[in-house]
Image: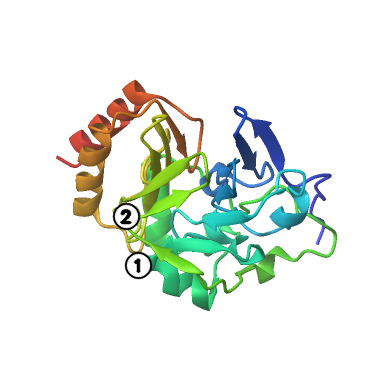
């Protein structure tokens, strides 16, 4: 098929003593998910798992030394493609059924529904015909892409806590981008893993399952959260001032 073969599929960046950012450099920004590994005293947490085109479990063995819980911020394919690789899996109940069944998705921009494609481009994304610039190995066929079934071992909702021993993350239900979108909030440090509820890029609120009214409520809530840093589902991390700017811009757009 003539695709370029990637020398390595994942890149890693140590953010601090506990947090490592993992990403897939050979896919388009639209589906280039931020994967976050958080080290805890008793167990570790993985926030989202990327596309699943290559094994995250194999590539990140040097990080995965403890018992590991994979938490999906929502069920879009760029966030749950590798979910099935991890035995301990958590996701909001509103989207648990989707990942439990597995589902088809496309790595080709021109295969998307015209209305969805138009909305994504109107938001500010470039959508190339191929949403990847390389494949992980010579035998990989991107036309056969499928998100493998991965039933949750625990469904989570607003107010639940994920305890790593020395760090405790509260689940915030942040619908709008999708029905079961969540954030993971650590009040003691001011750290928020926001998934796709908010990130420093074009926000998408007209996808199948999106709800603009719910998104407005989510943005009003996030605007008042006393964050120190937001580690989002896409694009670079940012602080409280930028969070307020992003929330205000969205609220003005949807006023």
Give the percent coordinates (x, y) of residue 127: 52, 48
Residue 230 to residue 254: above or below:
above
Query: In screen coordinates, is 99 left or right of 171?
Result: right
Image coordinates for residue 113, horizontal then vertical, percent? 44, 64
Colour scheme of the rendered structure: rainbow
| Residue for point 72% across, 56% down | 57
C-alpha separation, residue under disc 1 versus residue under disc 2: 18 Å
Say which of marks 1 and 2 sits in front: 1
- Residue 94's disc number: 1
Which residue is nearer to you in this view: 48 or 160? 160
Locate the N terminus and report the quarter of the image it occupies. bottom right
**Mark carried by residue 206:** 2
Residue 251, numbered label: none
Name which of mark 1 and mark 2 comes first in the sequence.
1
Q: Is residue 21 above or below residue 120?
A: above
Q: Residue at x 30, y 55 (%)?
A: 158
Q: Quadrant of residue 97?
A: bottom left
Q: Bin the neighbour count of mark 1 within 10 Å (Cα to Cα): few under 14, some 14-19, many 20 and up.
A: some
Q: Residue at x 39, y 58 (%)?
A: 116
Query: Residue 239's image quarter?
Result: top left
Q: Classify mark 2: residues with Cα within 10 Å, few (<14), some (14-19) or many (20+).
A: some
Q: Nearer the viewer, residue 233 or 144?
A: 233
Residue in the picture at 65% in, 67% down: 145
Secondary structure of the residue carrying tag 2 is: loop
């Amino acid at each position: 098929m003539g695709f370029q073969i990637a020398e390595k599929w994942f890149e890693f960046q140590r953010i601090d003593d506990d947090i490592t950012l993992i990403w897939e450099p050979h896919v388009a920004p639209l589906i280039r998910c931020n994967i976050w590994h958080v080290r805890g005293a008793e167990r570790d947490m993985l926030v989202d798992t990327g596309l699943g085109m290559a094994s995250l479990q194999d590539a990140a063995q040097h990080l995965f030394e403890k018992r590991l819980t994979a938490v999906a911020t929502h069920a879009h394919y760029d966030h749950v493609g590798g979910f099935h690789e991890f035995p301990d899996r958590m996701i909001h109940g509103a989207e648990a059924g989707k990942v439990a069944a597995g589902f088809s998705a496309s790595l080709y921009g021109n295969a998307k529904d015209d209305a969805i494609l138009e909305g994504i481009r109107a938001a500010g994304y470039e959508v190339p015909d191929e949403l990847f610039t390389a494949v992980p190995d010579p035998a990989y066929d991107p036309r056969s892409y499928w998100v493998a079934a991965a039933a949750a071992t625990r469904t989570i909702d607003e107010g639940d806590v994920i305890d790593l021993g020395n760090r405790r993350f509260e689940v915030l239900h942040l619908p709008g981008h999708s029905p079961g979108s969540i954030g993971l909030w650590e009040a003691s440090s001011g750290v928020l893993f926001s998934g796709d509820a908010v990130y420093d890029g074009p926000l998408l609120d007209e996808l199948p399952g999106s709800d603009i009214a719910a998104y407005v409520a989510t943005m009003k809530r996030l605007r008042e959260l006393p964050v120190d840093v937001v580690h989002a589902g896409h694009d670079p991390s940012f602080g409280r001032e930028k969070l307020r700017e992003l929330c205000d811009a969205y609220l003005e757009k949807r006023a």
